[in-house]
Image: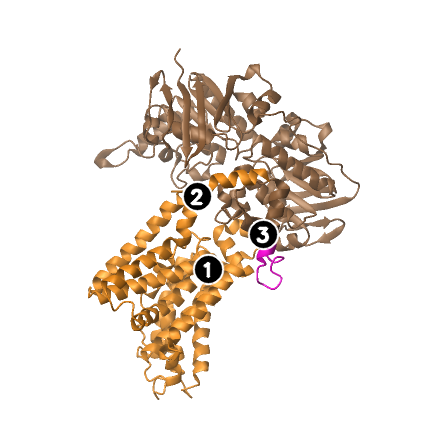
Chain colours: A brown, B orange
Amino acid sequence: MQPLLKVEGLKKSFGGVAALRDGRLELQAGSVHALCGGNGAGKSTFLSILMGIQQRDGGTIWRRGRQVHYSNPAEALASGIAIIEQELSPVPHMTVAENIYLGREPSGRFGGIDFKKMNRDAQQLLDRLEFGIRATQTMMTLSVAQMQLVEIAKAFSHEAEVIFMDEPTSAIGEKEAQHLFAAVARLKAEGKGVVYVSHRLSEIFQIADSYTVFRDGGYVGSGLLADIDRPGLIKMIVGRELGEEYIKTNDPTDEIGLEVSGLTLPGKIEDISFSVRKGEIFGIYGLMGSGRTEIFNCLFGLDRPSHGSIRLEGEQITVAKPADAMANGIAFVTEDRKVSGLNLADSVRGNICLASLPEMSPRFVMKGRDEAAASAEMIARFGIKAARDTMPVSGLSGGNQQKVVLGKWFLRQPRLLLLDEPTRGVDVGAKREIYRIICDFTAAGGTVVMISSEIDEVLGMSDRILVMRQGKSAGIHDRRATDAQSLVHLST
Amino acid sequence: MSNIENNSSRSWFSAENRGTLVQEYGIFLAFLLLAVILSFSNEYFLTPGNISNVLLQTSINGVLAIGMTFVILTRGIDLSVGSVVALAGMVSASFATTSATAGVAGAPYPFFVALAIGILVGVACGIIVGFIVSRFAVPAFVATLGMLSAARGMTLIYGGGKPVPALTPEFRWIGTGNILGIPMPVILLGIVFLASWWILTRTRFGRYIYAVGGNPHAAKTSGINVTRIRFLVYVISGGLSGLAGMMLSARTGSALPQAGIAYELDAIAAVVIGGTSLSGGVGRVTGTLIGALIIGVMNNGLDLMGIQSYYQQVLKGALIVGAVMLDQKRNQGL
């Protein structure tokens, strides 16, 4: 049988720099194909050429055995290729049906829109896919995961045969991810081909049949997932043996670093108590909206808890605003570096110095030399790959951006590190470097609390794990006494 | 460390880098080009008298545009500057007039009293706007649109709709005097420019402004008091509008209730032509100064060529849109 999509020797350069040297892929009908590779491996360029967003410099694309060329996204869509992007862009105030049929609404009398037909068609589609979404809901009332399902429905309504999914689970929780996987399984059963891009290897092994690995802009290998194990796939992605995926070298002391008792934020979290020892990595696991991020917001002065006390190394502290938390030696690496971690308009140096400006301007005037020295120190310490530290931080890869955020906080020499999804959207190699940084910090006596929705990461890195469910604690568990299944069970 | 070296050789030729070069010098080159064309097409253009004239005409808009730069850098906008110019000009003039009917009791006061009052009026307007924008999360467009109307109304109420004539020579000196041959308004613009440049590039406060404009969430989680910074930029813009109002009254010798109408548009134009992004966090006060000079030189040059002022407005409009189109193209990574 002809493959749905076959690509060979795809090439693309930007200003003399090859982003993609040799992109290859073969997608069969009724299969899920994982496209793997670190940040900068060329996956994004590959996808954007297939979507007609960028034009190739060389190579051939066959769609059902016929050579094709797409000069814009509409042509790609017309030939049955749809993409579910990492960052969704719905029209929030419109209904689900309006979003699905955006730009091709069925016309009614007098050139208006036949809303009745549109809503009926959309509902039929959603029901057939068993998504449990009403077509007349406005988009803004949906969760991120539901929006992705709407995107899938939209791809379906375009009668797409090839569906690209770019990091679809990066913004959703474990339970919602399972819904998404069920939808992917349904696509497969309908004979569609799905190209699934993700950094999360456990997902790939769960839902994909075959894989293709890119590294440094070139094809490395492909095959059936049944024929390869996890370490083998990692080795292909990073090009060397990584050894253990999770580095855990910390050794908790007996001293209490952080003690939280009775923390309550009405409507969000209720009576949360836990204590973390110095040198310990304390994990928090829970679904989106379970109140996990609110715990950090209260500790860092972004939310005002109605009850509860915080003790840092035995000393009671009050935190009314982030500056108070920072003065007490608390650092907060937020969930989404682009939304609340980095000033993307600024340079690498500017971002590293962002949380230390008063310290670098004792008499109001900035000490340029201190800024340059601090930035150079953090770049060297964390191996941040940047051409110059005056280049815009937006030009760095995800892993390096995350290291800039870490550098910003380590510059303040914190006692307590709050990490909210520290490795989201970061490739396997950079993940390990970040784990190394966390472990070094605890080895020096630091206290770490880490939120993660990646269950392997929570189990691999934490000493103990607090499970959050609907704003309440569902118990604190030792890593050796629990497993992935029971964590998922407790959190839902 | 080897990575750093590797990358630098590669990205030196990158599009991003060329974009930076355009950003750094593009506006300055455009200005020079305009000046060269004008100096060839008209022998009067480069005479000291005309240069001084251009600078004089640019000074009020320059001061307003610099204040506007602070606001726009934090993702805001200040539509009220023209009305605040009129109000501050009117109130300060009433302290510096020799007219028995138009002045306040005891007028004329020494010019520095009138000067202080004018700046205070501007600062007060800025405090009101800044408070509304920063504390009540009212969009800056709306809050300053309100002040645009309210300050104009207050000007009319305060002066009874009539001008304040006969200002004292000392007060007029800030608009018409000179030091070593340099007109006072130009000196004031120079002082305002240098102080703003220093604040924005060298101080903690300047870094805060860029951070708040670039990403308010990240600024907040980095311990920056976003509310206070947002408040202060409107106070700065208000104070500078007050100063500009007095420069205008002093130059014309009387304060008019309809002074400063549509001045906000020229100020915004100068900021935008100068390369400051309306989405905040990117821009520099040097660009704004050159933007204001471009507008001044263009008006002057077209005057010298005997082109009707109506055409000047059309050209200015095209210039503003063209500058932003270039900016957009640059932001898309070329």
Q: Earlier in the sequence, mark 1 or mark 2?
A: 2
Q: According to the image, label 3 marks what residue?
A: A372
* Residue A136 location, quadrant: top left
In the rendering, at what x and y percent does residue A429 appear?
59, 31
Vertical placement of residue A259 versus A467, above or below:
below
- Magenta region, main secondary structure: loop
Residues marked 3 and 1, same chain: no
CB under 8 Å between callouts 3 and 1?
no
Q: Residue furthest top?
A: A1
Q: According to the image, label 1 marks what residue?
A: B133
User: Could you classify mark 1 by the number of other residues whose Cα lies within 10 Å: few (under 14), some (14-19), or many (20 or more)?
Assistant: many
Q: Which residues are magenta?
A: A357-371
Compared across the picture, whether A156 is left or right of A321 comes to left
The stretch drawn in magenta includes residue A188: no
Compute the Cα span from label 1 to label 2: 35 Å
Vertical placement of residue A430 versus B279, above or below:
above
Q: Residue at x 38, y 46 (%)?
A: B330
Please tell me the numbered disc located at residue B16: 2
Mark 3: secondary structure? helix
Letter of the chain that mark 2 sits on in the rendering: B
CB under 8 Å between callouts 1 and 2?
no
Mark 1: secondary structure? helix
Closer to the observer: label 1 or label 2? 2
**Would you say residue B128 is visible in this rendering?**
no
Q: Residue at x 37, y 69 (%)?
A: B59
Residues marked 1 and 2, same chain: yes
Residues marked 2 and 3, same chain: no
Foreground: A310 or A115?
Answer: A310
Foreground: A387 or B173?
Answer: A387
User: Could you classify mark 2 by the number of other residues whose Cα lies within 10 Å: few (under 14), some (14-19), or many (20 or more)?
Assistant: some
